[in-house]
Image (spheres, grey):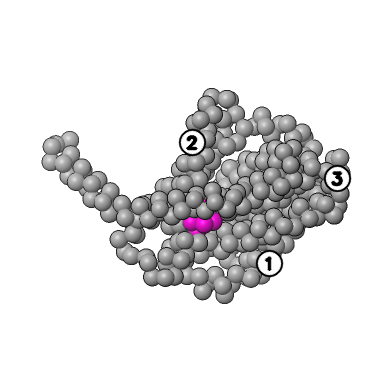
Amino acid sequence: MSIEERTSRVTDGTRRIRAAAPGLLAAAAAAAVGYAVNRSVGSAASPVVVAVVLGILVRGLGGYHSRLRDGLAFASRTLLRAGVVLLGLQLALSDIRQLGVGAVAVILLSVVTAFVVTRWCGRLLGLSPARALLVATGVSICGASAVAAMKQVTDGDEEDVVTAVTVVTVLGTLCLAALPALGVLLGLDETTLGLWAGMSVHEVGQVVAIGGMAGTAALTVAVVAKLCRVVLLAPLVAVVAATRRNAAADGTRPPILPWFVVGFMAMAAVRSAGLVPGVVLHSAATASGLMLAAAMFALGTAVDLRNIARGGWRALSAGALGTMVLASLSLTGLVLIG
């Protein structure tokens, strides 16, 4: 490579960095605000959800500028996928084994059934295939993070993503009040309530909030049950990606496994092998959350809230039905396995 070519590459790289800087700084600021709100309000206020709301507000109030475009595009693609990869470090398969075969079977059956029912109901109510898929993924797996991951292998747009995130946020918030009250009404012990929350509530932060209210034992099993659902994110995304690969009408052949799914599974394997120090795990969890929050802010800036309001009831109805199926099957299964 000649000196002129090297100089040209350096110049192009510098130009791209300068073009992306304003948008990346805006996304980073939104992620930081999301974490600040989370620290002030508690785990029920997810930084990812706060960042989405900020993005929508920026767009709605006329704060979006073309100078932000390159940086926000980088955040919505590259940072999102990197955040999903680091999310894998939160999963330790040894923790999941402690739940027992019965509980794991209940989680698997409940998640698959809720996913199928939510997706079918969404299509019946007139949602686009992509929007129905994203709502079903968010309800059945792990809320906004699952929606963000699934978006990478669908043709859904930013409004589909934000609609799905809004649905799981609203429904998960309702669960914060409903599940503890139902637990008392049904006479559930601390451990059963924790398992039920982990098996049926959407966001990790919401599960932590419910488990924390119920007690230490409930919090521990709630988080483990929730992480067991998160494990299902990789195979679900892989199945959808493979299906789309086979069904592509334009002759394109996307990868059987997207690279970020491979990375997610690799990070889970590394964590399960006990190769990562605790301080690194904590830093990775923070980095993953910041990346996902920045990405969701970027997606939020492309959304017209009026369009969501017009069709949001359909997505909310599908998500509500899926949530009820998930919660009902989970509790029934827990009762049956004792």
Q: Main secondary structure of the magenta part?
A: helix
**Residue at the spot of label 3:** 335
Give the crowd class for mark 1: few <14, some 14-19, many >=20 residues within 10 Å.
some
- Where is mark 2, residue-wise? 283
What residue is drawn where x is 47% and y is 61%? 54
Q: Position of residue 121 (x, y in %)?
A: 69, 64
Q: Amino acid at mark 2?
A: Ser
Q: Secondary structure at mark 2?
A: helix
**Sequence-first tag of 3 and 2:** 2
Q: Amino acid at mark 3?
A: Val
Q: Residues within 10 Å of mark 2 (few under 14, many from 20)?
A: few
Image quadrant assignment for residue 22 = bottom left
Q: Quadrant of residue 7?
A: top left
* Residue 51, image x, y percentages: 48, 56
Drawn side of residue 141 relative to residue 69, left or right: right
Tell me the residue that label 1 is attached to. 317
Q: Quadrant of residue 325?
A: bottom right
